[in-house]
Amino acid sequence: MGNDMREISVRAMLEGREQSLSAHASRSTTSKGRKLTESRSPLRTEFQRDRDRIIHTKAFRRLNHKTQVFISPLGDHYTTRLTHTLEVSQIARTIARALNLNEDLTEAIALGHDMGHTPFGHVGEEVIGELIPGGFRHNHQSLRIIDILEKSGQGLNLTYEVRMGIKLHSKPRSDIFRKDLLDDLTLEGQAVRISDAIAYLNHDIGDAIRAGILKEEDLPPQATKVLGKKKSNRINTMVTDIVESSALLFPKDNSPPNLTFGDGILETFTLLRNFMFEEVYLPVSSGEESTKSKEILTFLFSHFEKNPDQIPSEYWIRDESITQMVVDYVSGMTDRYALRTAENLRPGITGEAFSRII
């Protein structure tokens, strides 16, 4: 009995600390809850439990071998989907801490936001989207993994706030601060959403330079002048501006504001983001490895639609269509697993582009 009381007091102490957060922060005690009611943890808040559940999933572990931008690079220092996720978490937690938001909720959303990404990065998302009615969006697949696929079809039963933060983190190429895109997001979810863009812009610049696609002097002069020449300078400038600009909008008695850049940084951020789309993202998506990746994923999709009995039993859950099971299986593959599976099924399909890793 004594131990039980001490354990209960731990959670109560953590929940008590949340009361000192910003009036606009989310609190685990006022969460909209889970789809299925559960007994509460004696040692962790609800958002802490969600974070831990995400970390222990198969989908989270697979991020280590999924492409960020550059497909199967030879160097050891290119960003993977996992290192990207960790960078997003770090940046978002910095913003949340500075604005006195809920850091546990922020971390849970950040760690789970990209679990639905396909092999071969956005190239894979594009291919699968063309093969199924209604298209494919990795943020929706992240939610499907969390709600259905993990734990042999039971799902993780995460809180509403974490689920919505993951579902709504994706951004259009245009105005990423459009109000209608933020209405259902907590401020913690907004912190992850902008941190995702801050992280990928900056590490993708480094990877593009490493790959010989860019040189530092190719970056727009306004971007280096306003944001800084080094990755650390650019991230610090962006994060500081988000915190300072957003804090000014935090009245104590009004409805929660949206996180935002100041006008000067927003203009430069948009300039740099458009530059990366034109000079890196679009050219990479039409390169030799990307073209071969599209062929491989198209083949895998077709093969498993014709041979659903070869899909592992863990994907045979609920009353799903064969097409949906194929989507779940193929989109969940790592780059290496997709390549090896395709090569085993059709020797030679991976060609010269991937011969070094097969």
Image: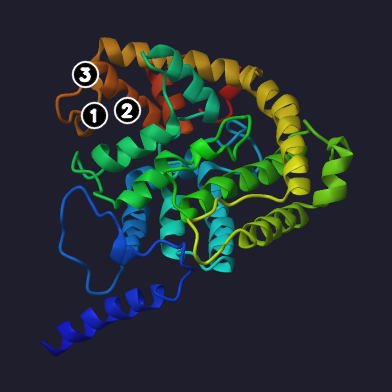
Location of mark 2 (residue): 329
Residue 305, x across and y down, in percent: 29, 13
Relative to 57, does residue 207 appear above or below in the rendering? above
Count of numbered circles on the image: 3
Q: Disc 3 on helix, strand or loop?
A: loop
Answer with the quarter of the image where residue 246 lies: bottom right
Q: Which residue is mark 1?
A: 312
308 vs 12, nearest the viewer: 12
Mark on residue 291? none
Which comes before the other along the chain, label 1 or label 2?
A: 1
Q: Position of residue 141 (x, y in %)?
A: 37, 33
Viewer can see residue 17: yes
Callout 1: SS: loop
Q: Residues within 10 Å of mark 1 (few under 14, many from 20)?
A: few
Name the mark on residue 321: 3
Question: Eyeballing the image, is 303 above or below 289?
Answer: above
**Residue at left 38%, top 38%?**
142
Instruction: Say which amino acid is labelled 1.
Output: Pro
- Is there CB contact under 8 Å for labels 1 and 2? yes
Q: Is residue 108 left or right of residue 151?
A: right
Query: Which is more foreground, mark 3 or mark 1?
Result: 3
Residue drawn at the location 19% of the way across and 38% of the way down: 153
Is there any visible trace of residue 350 in the rendered image? no
- Name the colouring of the figure: rainbow
As drawn, 201 above or below 86: above
